[in-house]
Image (cartoon, rainbow, N blue to C red):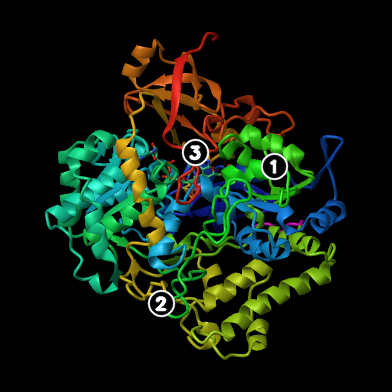
Amino acid sequence: MPTETHHRICPICEAGCGLIVTTDGSEVKQVRANPDDLFSEGYICPKGVSLKELHDDPDRLRTPLIKRNGKHEVAAWDEAFTEIEKRLPPILKDNGPLSSAIYIGNPTAHNFELGLGLGPLGMALQSPNIFSAGSVDQIPKQFACGLMYGTWLSIPVPDIDRSDYIVMLGANPIVSNGSLWMVPNFRGRLKRMQARGGRMVVIDPRRTETAEAADNHHFIKPGTDAFFLMGVLNVLFAENLTDTAYIRPHLKDFEKIEPLTHTFVPETVAPICGIDANTIRDIARDLAITKRAAIYGRMGTTTQKHGALTSWLLEIANIAAGNLDVEGGSMFAKAPAFADNAVGRPGIGKGETVYKYASRVRGIPEVMNNLPVACLAEEIETPGDGQIRTLITLGGNPVLSIPNGDRLAEAFEQLDFMVSLDIYLNETTRHADVILPGTSPFEKSHYDYYLSPMATRNVARLSSPLFPSDRPTEWQVLLQLSAIAGGHGVLGDNALAAMEDQIVFAQISSLTADEHSSIAGRDPQEIFTSLEAEGGAERLTEVALRTGAYGDAFGTKPDGLTYASVAESPNSVDLGPLTPRLPECLRTPSGKIECAPHEIITGIDQLEDHLNAATSNKLMLFGRRQVRSNNSWLHNLPVLAKGPYRCTLMLHPEDAAELGIGNQEHATITSNRGRLEVQVEITETVMKGTVCLPHGWGHDHEGTDLSIAAGRPGVNMNLLADDTLLEPLTGTAVLNGIPVEVAPARTH
Ligand SMILES: Nc1nc2c(c(=O)[nH]1)N[C@H]1C(S)=C(S)[C@@H](COP(=O)(O)OP(=O)(O)OC[C@H]3O[C@@H](n4cnc5c(=O)[nH]c(N)nc54)[C@H](O)[C@@H]3O)O[C@H]1N2
Ligand SMILES: Nc1nc2c(c(=O)[nH]1)N[C@H]1C(S)=C(S)[C@@H](COP(=O)(O)OP(=O)(O)OC[C@H]3O[C@@H](n4cnc5c(=O)[nH]c(N)nc54)[C@H](O)[C@@H]3O)O[C@H]1N2
Ligand code: SF4
Ligand SMILES: [Mo]
C-alpha cells in the first residue's frame, strides 16, 4: 500500500493543533505537526503524537459491553440497544423523567457528535438532572461572562499576538495549552511577545512551567485571587487610572463598581493573598498604562472558593483598565459557526438567566442548565420523589474527576440502570450496565464547535474521517438512545436516517423563519437538498457554517465559506486577527455590558466574611496538570505513561523540614474527607504553606480494563476534596485550596 498523508485537527485539547497523519492502508504510521497550519503554526504536544497509540490501543473499546452477573461481556450493537430498550423505558415510565440523569464529560467539548447529539437526548429524557464536568471546571467564568455579555460563550481572550502585557492568574498554558482560550503554540506566541518587548506576569501558588517562561511570577495563596483583583481595582479607581471613555456607551452600572472596592486597599488585601501592596499597585498601573494589555484567569481562579467573583473581577479589571475589546487587549473572537454572539440580531438579545431550578436534595440552583456534579451522589442515594435511578454518562470519568469519587462509585451501584458512551472500561464505566464505544479520533469528523468562540485568531477548520468505521457514529448512538428513551424503540437504519433528516430540517427551518438569519425567508427544502456534507453532525455544522458570520448563506454570498471549502483547506481557513466587536457582539437585553449583575453583586459579602474569618494554619492543597496526561485518561498509552513517577505531592522545603519528611519519602495527606499515602517531591516551586498534587490518577479499581494505567495507578487527589464545599454562586466544586494535614507515613 502506498503511504498517504492527511491533514487533521487534534481533538484532545483546546489548542486544536493541525496534524499530519501518515497512513499505510488501514494503519496509522505516524502523527506529527502540520508545519503549515495557519493557526497552530507547526506546534504539537506529546498527546497529539500519542493519537496513533490511542487509535491502536488494544484496551480501547471497539464493541459494546453488557454487564452480566457482575462482569462486562462483549455484545453486538443490536444486542446492546435491545438491552437498553428492555431496561430503560420501563424505569422512566414508572418513575418519570426526574428519575433519569446525564453526566457530560470533558471530551464532549471536543467532539461535535457528542455535543450536537446531546440536544435530542435531552429532549427525549426531559430531565433537569444534567450534570457535567463544567461544575468541576469552567462554569464560574461562563456564569460571569454570560451574565455580563449575554451568551455563555461570549468569553474574551487575551490578544496575545498583539499584546504587550499579560497578567495570568491560575492558568498554566505551557502545559495545558490554554483553556477557554484556543491558543496553540503558546510558548512560541509568548516568545514573540517578549521579543517585541512585551511582558507576562504569572500569579500562581506554584512557579509553573508558564511562570518559568514568563517575565515575573508572584506566589498567591490558593483561593484569594478575588482579594488581589479587588486590590488592583482599588488602585485603578484611587489613582484615576481607569480608561473607559471609549467603552462607556456600552457599559451599564459601571459606576456601581468603585464603591465596592473601597475596603480593599492593597495593604488590606496583601496579607490575605500573599502578594505585597507595591506589587499590586505596580500591576494595576501597568495594566492601565500599557496600551495593549490584558488580564486572564482560568482553572485556578474558577475551581476555588470565590470562583465566580474572581471571574467577574477579571472582566471588570479589563474594562476598568481600558483593555476590553481593544487590539492587544482582551478581545472577543468571531467564530464561523455555533456562535450565538456572531449571528442573529446584533447588539441585543435575550441574555442568559440562571437559578431556574435547583437540585432536589441540597437545593443548589442550576447554572447553564447544569446541576453541580458534587450533588450527583446524594441525588442517587436519597430516597423520595425524583430520586435518580438511571444515568447516562457521555465521555466522562466522574469517579476520578469529582470530589469524593468513592462515594459516587458506591452510589452508581445503587442505580437501576446505567449506560456509558465511552472508549474505555474505566473507573466510571465499570459501573455501567451497558457501555457503548465511541469511535477513534481517526474514524470521525472533527469541528471545534464549542471552542472556536474563544480562539486567539479567527479561524475555520474541519477534519473528515481518516478511516471508515463499520460502527455507528456517536451522533447515531445518541439518536438511538433518544429514540429508546422517547419510547420509540430501537430504530432501523431508515428510521434513524429519517430522524436525522428531521433534526437537520428543523434546524434549517428555524433559520429560514428567523428574520435576522442570512437565509431568512428562503425555502428550507431547497436548502436541505443542497447540503454537501454527509452525516447528521456534519450537516448541522454545514448549516451553522454557511449561515454563520463568514458563510456563503447558501449561495447569496458566493465568496463565503461552504462546508467543502473549509474541509478542503488542509492548513485551516484563516479569517484574520481578532477585531473590536462592541457593541455588535452583545446579546444582553439592555444591549450593554451588565457590569453589576445582581446574582454576582449579592456575593460580595463572601469577601467580607473571608476578611473576618480566622486564618487556618493548615496546609492548602491545590492541583496541577501534566504534559503527558489529560485529566483521568490517556494514562493507558505507553508513549505518555513512560518516564518518572509523576503523581507526587509537591512540598516546600521549609514545610518538609518542619514536618520531618525527606524528598521521595512517603507521607500521608489527610483532609476532612479522606486520607492518601503519597510520594513527596520537595521543591521550592510551590509556595510555602501549600502542597500540590495532580488530578486524574487512582487507577487501582477492580473491574477496569486499563492494563498500562493500572501498572502505575497513582492516587486520586479528589478523594481529599470535599463534596459539600462548593463555590456559592455556581455550585462549582472547590478543588484548589483544600485544607489538609501532611505527616510522615509510617510504612514505606
Ligand atoms: N482535583 C481536580 N479535579 C479535577 C480537575 C482539577 O484540575 N483538579 N479538573 C477538572 C476538569 S477541568 C475537568 S474537564 C474534569 C474532567 O472530568 P471528566 O470529563 O469526567 O473526566 P475525563 O478524565 O476527561 O474523562 C474523559 C472520559 O471520556 C472518555 N473519552 C475520551 N475520548 C472519548 C470519545 O471520543 N468519545 C467518548 N464517548 N468518550 C471518550 C475517556 O475514556 C474518559 O472516560 O476533571 C475535573 N477534575
Ligand atoms: N497536559 C494537559 N493539558 C490539559 C489538561 C490536562 O489534564 N493535561 N486538561 C485540559 C482541561 S480539561 C482544562 S480545563 C485545561 C485547564 O487549563 P488551565 O486553566 O491552564 O489549568 P491548569 O494547568 O490546571 O492551571 C491551573 C493553575 O492554577 C494554579 N492555581 C491553583 N489554585 C490557584 C489559586 O487559588 N489562584 C491562582 N492564581 N492559581 C491557582 C495551579 O497552580 C495551576 O498552575 O487544561 C486542558 N489541557
Ligand atoms: S496541544 Fe497537544 S493535545 Fe492539545 S491539540 Fe495540540 S497536539 Fe493535541
Ligand atoms: Mo476541563
Residue sitting at the far left: 239
Is residue 465 among what the camera can see?
Answer: no
For mark 1, does the 10 Å Cα neighbourhood hold few (<14), some (14 to 19), or many (20 or more) residues?
Answer: some
**Residue on which the image places disc 1:** 382
Residue 43: percent from the left, percent from the top? Answer: 42, 49
- Is the residue 45 above or below the residue 464 in the image? above
Where residue 243 sits, quadrant-wise, is: bottom left
Mark 2 → mark 1, Cα distance in angstroms: 43 Å
Q: Amino acid at mark 2?
A: Ile
The residue closer to the viewer here, 429 or 608, is 608
Look at 64% across and 86% down and name the residue there: 524
**Residue on which the image places disc 2:** 348
Residue extent of the magenta highlight: 466-471
Task: Name the secondary structure under disc 1.
Answer: loop
Q: Main secondary structure of the magenta part?
A: loop
Residue 383: percent from the left, percent from the top? Answer: 73, 43
